[in-house]
Image (cartoon, rainbow, N blue to C red):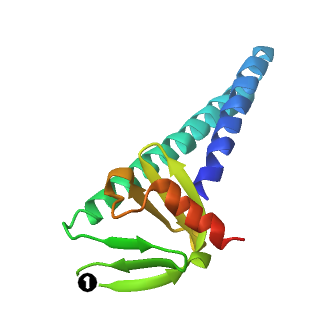
Amino acid sequence: MQQRLVPVGFILVLIGIVFSFASNIDISYLKQCAGFFIVLGITIVSWHYWEKQHWFNRMIQDSADGTEQVMVFNEAGIKTKSSISSGEATWKIVKKIVPAKNGIFLVLKKGISIYIPKQSISDGNTMEEIIKLYEESRV
């Protein structure tokens, strides 16, 4: 939802700029509105990127407990195992796979994502093979 606010913030800044040019007409409330829209727009955009960075740092800290999470990808789906849990899921849980520069994101239903770094993929799987398994499950 917050990502949708970024264009709103930019639009408010643009409205503020238009109002500031229109304030040459010497209507004082237009000058106040221009300043308000510019400040509000910049605040919305800044808040979005601050919150995004804060969330990312929090996720890194929460996942830095030192335990290993093993994920096995096959035709049937994904199997996971760690020191505190294990589980299985079919490929239906994965909404889409988004390749990134240094890994892949498994975008699951309900907006949850799992990032898998490229250097952590081993035991016969590659990023391309994982994507292929996912695409084959969609047919």
Is 29 above or below relative to 116?
A: above
> Is 3 placed left or right of 63 in the picture?
right
Is 75 above or below relative to 106?
A: below
Q: Residues within 10 Å of mark 1 (few under 14, many from 20)?
A: few
- Please identify the quarter of the rendering in which residue 55 is found: bottom left
> What residue is shown at x 45% (from left), y 84% (from top)?
88
| Picture mark count | 1
> What residue is shown at x 44% (from left), y 56% (from top)?
126
In the foreground, 55 or 81: 81
Q: Give residue 23's position: percent from left, percent from top.
A: 75, 20
SS type, badge 1:
loop
Q: Give residue 78's position: percent from left, percent from top.
A: 47, 76
Q: Give residue 52's position: percent from left, percent from top.
A: 45, 51
In the foreground, 138 or 115: 138
Residue found at the far left of this picture = 66
Circle 1 is placed at which residue position?
A: 84
Residue found at the far top of this picture = 24
- Please identify the quarter of the rendering in which residue 24 is found: top right
In the foreground, 85 or 50: 85
> Is 78 placed left or right of 58 in the picture?
right
The three-letter amino acid code for the residue at tag 1 is: Ile
Residue found at the far front of this picture = 124
> What residue is shown at x 68% (from left), y 71% (from top)?
138
Which quadrant of the rendered structure holds the C terminus? bottom right
Is 128 above or below relative to 11?
A: below
Which quadrant of the rendered structure holds the N terminus? bottom right
Q: Give residue 62's position: percent from left, percent from top.
A: 28, 65
Is 46 above or below relative to 1?
A: above
> What residue is shown at x 34% (from left), y 85% (from top)?
86
